[in-house]
Structures are given as structure tokens and as C-alpha cells.
Image: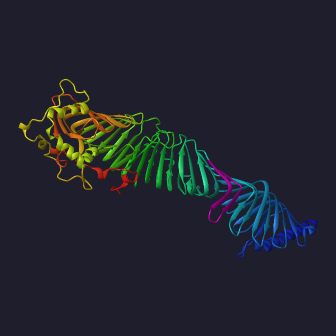
Amino acid sequence: MKAKNKFIVFTIKIFLVSFFFCTCFTGFAQQNRTIHVVHANSLEFDKRLGDGAQRLIGNVILADDSTTLYSDSAYSFPDNSFRAFGHVHMSRKDTMDLYGDSLHYDGLTRMAEVFGKTIRCIRKGMTLTTKHLKYDIGGHFVNYWDGGTIVDTANTLTSMIGIYNTGEKMCYFKNKVVLTNPKYVVRCDTMLYAPDSRTAYFIGPTRITSKNNFMYCEKGYYNTKKNYCQFWKKPYILNKKGDSLSGEQIYYDRERDYGQILGNVSMVDTTDNIILKGEYAEYNGNDETMLATCKALLLQVYNKDTLHLHGDTLFGKNISMTDTGKTGKPKLMLAYHHVKFFKKDLSGKCDSLTYDEKDSIMRMFYNPILWSDVNQLTADSMRLHFKNKKMDVLDMRGHSFIASKDTLASKLMEADSAAADYTNKDTIKKDTLRKPLIKAVLHDTLKKDSLLMPHDSSKGDSSKNHLDSVPKHKIFHGSDTLQFNQIKGKNMKGYFRDNKIYKIYVSGNAQTIYYAYTDNNTAILGANRADCSYMIIFIVENKINSITFLQKPDATLFPIKEVKPLEFLLGGFHWHERERPRTVEDIFKGSE
């Protein structure tokens, strides 16, 4: 009989517990969800907690169609709220498990608050640990505000504030956010994180540090699973040497060490003082190459000046942003199509250009032109040798030509007084006329077998022999006719001192035309034309100072009254003044 009564009492207790939790958890789980007691060792009423307050003790298990709660004990209240204590574990359909020391649940708001020394929230390989957590079951939010740590298979993330939307499967972190990966560390103030794709989205200043480089942006994302990222708003990449890569947008694949940069691209090489710019660029770390296009610009910074070089496409070899490649190899720079460059003491243009650090030679191809101060230099191809980052030797190959305007000759020839002086000097003997020429121009540098030959009238007007291929276009500057000093030959070598030409060696069919003056440069003597197979020309202050003829020369001084500047030009002469870049802006004209 006693056993039967005990069984009846136990059955009543289980019925009351089941009835209570079915009623209480109806508010907990809306849409007619049924919450039932799966297990409890005992049920007690405790008036000290309020009217209707009940207590479940021992191995408590509560469940509805999506959630199961485990705890050592629990209190329930008439307002559909309850508290669970001791080894609290909430599980939702095998998608998320929540562990804590205690849990408070409001049945009306469906808000659960978890406390404990170490609260753990586990979802598909991702574990959140914190000390205080709220779980909005209806809104599908888990959040903390006293600091938390999230660990997944590849990353560890810490922040002061965190929110996890279990419905959208997205995490939001705020304040002192740090994501640590074996290959890098991300620090920012605000981050969104998608656990399934392991993608972090950045808002605000973000710094990514690795052993190879440093990356910065104020907006962007990083797929930590596939190891690629895209940055906006002031992004840049910096390596340990101090080299930087920046633009308006940067896409970077860390696995392939490959990047694309859009808008205001700038690559700074601090080792060689080179800056590469453009509107679009590609970087390939495996090949150690960099390509820039769309208003591409290369700047070579010197102590007191900067070389600006533009081409449709600029290409660099042996460039690394990671410091893990084949460092120390000399860089190779290529520019092709519509190449122009400008420097205070040097400018030029060509179709294609290369510069190799290995031999410090800049090679120019297809109609190259160089302008050095007043001198215009042209040839089929050119090689400009640098030494200690200064111009050293210019090697001109094929149809080499150097021309410069003689402004002093123009002024003297246009002046009425000068014309009168030359009229009065018609009676001066030719021998007297030639003596100051030899003194002023040759300065006793001629060798014994190098002679300034007089004009032989029996040969006719020899100047016409040099005008067969003269272009028919006329050369004027406003209304003033110009005079040109000219040097022509098959090949030439120009030698520089302090970035200025001081000596020129001409080999093969060497020819010159230049204007000669009196000692004080107050009167013009005439125009001298000289022919020789080989000659050496010395230049002082951008003017011919002396000529050494190395083989039988043929030189003639034409009195100024016989000189017609438009006709007194060597074959193949062209004046490209309108094409000369005189400012940085000029190097972009005609190429875009």
C-alpha cells in the first residue's frame, strides 16, 4: 500500500512539473511551441521567491522543437521566466551549444542572459568564450560587451563587444578588435565576420601585419579561408624595406602574391628612390613584376632633381613587396609606346625604352630624341650610360645628329649695325678672316695632320652637296629666321660632366656646320662647314669650342653674306622643338 501511494505521489509531481513547463514555455516559444520537461529529479514550491515560484532540482532537462536546456537546477516563475543554475547547457538543433554557470530567461522577450567565469558558445567549429552573454532567441542574436574571444579552425578573434546573428550567420565586433592568424594579425576598431566563409569585413582604420609586409585600409574585406583580400579608402601595402604600394582600391591574393590596384596607383621603391604611378597596375610577386598603365608615370628621384617618365605602359622586373623573393637582383624597367620624359637638364621621347640596373644603361628605340640644354640629339637608337646616378656616356647609333639654335648668330644677323659691319668688311682678306677662326674655334687643338681646309671655288657651291635630303619645311620662330649649329655622323658618343655634354666623338661621315665669331662675340665671322670621317668636338657652355679632325678634313668658312639659314642645313636635319617636353605635364600630351 505504501509503495502504491509513493508511486501516485511521484506521478502527480511529474504531472505538475510537465503542466507548469508546458504553460511557462508557451511564452518562451511562440507560434504554439510546446516546452516540456524531459527530466527532473524533483519539483518544489518556494514562496520565498514569489507566489507560484517553483524549483526543479537534479539533472534538469527542458526542451521544445528546436532547443534543449540542461542544468543542475532551475527556478520557474508565473510570468513565464525561469533561471537555470549549475552546468547550464543550451543546445539548438545541433547548430549551436551554449555553456555557462547560470542562465536567466525572460519568457515574454525570449531573452536569455548567461553568466559564468567561462561562458562558451560553440557553433560548427567556432567557439566563443566570454564572462557575460545575452542570447535573443527570437531575434537570433548572441552578444557580449565585457570582452570575448572567438576561435575557429584558423583564426583567433578578440574584441570588447561582439554580436553574433545566428540567423544571418554573421558576427559583428567592436572596440579593440584583433584577429590572429598563423600568417598575419588584423587590428581594427570595427569588423564584420562571416564564420562559414571565414571572411572578415573592415570598417574604419584597419592594420594587417605579417612577417613579410604591412597592410592598411579603412574599408575592405579579407577572406581568411582562401587568403585573398580587397581594400578601399586609403589602402596601402608596406614591406620591411619601406617600399609601399597604394591606390584607391587594392585586390591582393596572398597565396599567389598577386595584386591589382585601381585609381591613383603609387609604388614607392625606397632602395632606388623610384616611384611608379598610374590609374591601373598589376603586381605579381612570384615573377617579381609590376605593370602600370593609364597615365603611367615613373619618377626617379635624385638629390636635387627628379626624372619624370611616361609611357602607355610601364613594366618593372625584380620588384618584391614581400621580401621573400629573390632579393638583391638588379631591377629592369621597360616603357613602351609614346614614351616621353622630363628632367631639368634632360628630356626626351621615343617609342620604347628600357633601363637595366645591371649595367646602368637606358636604351631608347624607334625615333629617339634627347634634349640636353640647348642641344637636340637624334639617332636610330640611343644608349645612355649612367654612373653614380649621373649621365656618363651617350652612345648614338645610326643617322646620328646633334643640332642647336645659335641665338647669338640670329641676333647679330638681324641687327642693322651688324649688317653694316659685314658690308664694310668685304675688303678683308680671306687669310685675315681665317686667323681669328682658328684662334677662336680650334684653340690650337688640331693635330698636325688636321687642317681647316679653305673653300675651293672650282668645286662649285659645295654646300649644295649637303642639302640633297634637307626637308622642304621651313623653320621660323615668329618672324625671325633661325640659325643652327649642327653635327652629323653615322655614329656618335657623347661624354657628360655634371650631366652636361662636354665632348662628342663622331665616327663615319662626320659633318658639322657652326657659326664663328670674333674674340669678343660682338661680330659674326661666318658659318663654317667641315667634313671628315672622324672628329672630336669639345663643347663649352653648350657651344662648340674646338674640333679635332682625325683624318683628312674638308673645311670651309662661308662669309655671312653668303649664308642663307633656311638652306644652310645638313641632310637629314629636322627641328623637333614643338615635341620637346618642358614641363611634367608636357610628357602626357599626345599620348592619351
Number of numbered discs visible in the structure rendering: 0
User: Which of 28/165 is in front?
Assistant: 165
Q: Where residue 370 appears, x then y in whole percent?
A: 31, 44
Please name the predominant secondary structure of the magenta segment in the image. strand
| Residue occupying image coordinates x 79% and y 58% | 115
User: Which of 170/489 is in front?
Assistant: 489
Furthest residue to the top?
448
> Taking 390 as reference, is 209 above or below it?
below
> Taking 329 as reference, is 370 above or below it?
below
Q: Where residue 69 appears, x then y in whole percent?
A: 76, 62
On screen, residue 499 versus residue 153, left or right, reads left
Furthest residue to the bottom?
32
Q: Where residue 371 appears, x then y in whole percent?
A: 32, 44
Q: Which residues are magenta?
A: 156-180
On screen, residue 442 versus residue 342, left or right, reads left
Q: Mark yes or no: residue 400 visible.
A: no
Q: Quadrant of residue 17?
A: bottom right
Q: Quadrant of residue 425?
A: top left
Residue 99 sits inside the magenta stretch = no
Q: Where residue 314 appears, x then y in whole percent?
A: 38, 48
User: Which of 173/1 is in front?
Assistant: 173
Colour logic? rainbow
Furthest residue to the left?
458
> Taking 223 as reference, is 8 above or below it?
below
Q: Quadrant of the C terminus?
A: bottom left
Q: Quadrant of the N terminus?
A: bottom right
Q: Mark yes or no: residue 162 visible.
A: yes
On screen, residue 587 versus residue 62, left or right, reads left
| Residue occupying image coordinates x 19% and y 23% | 448
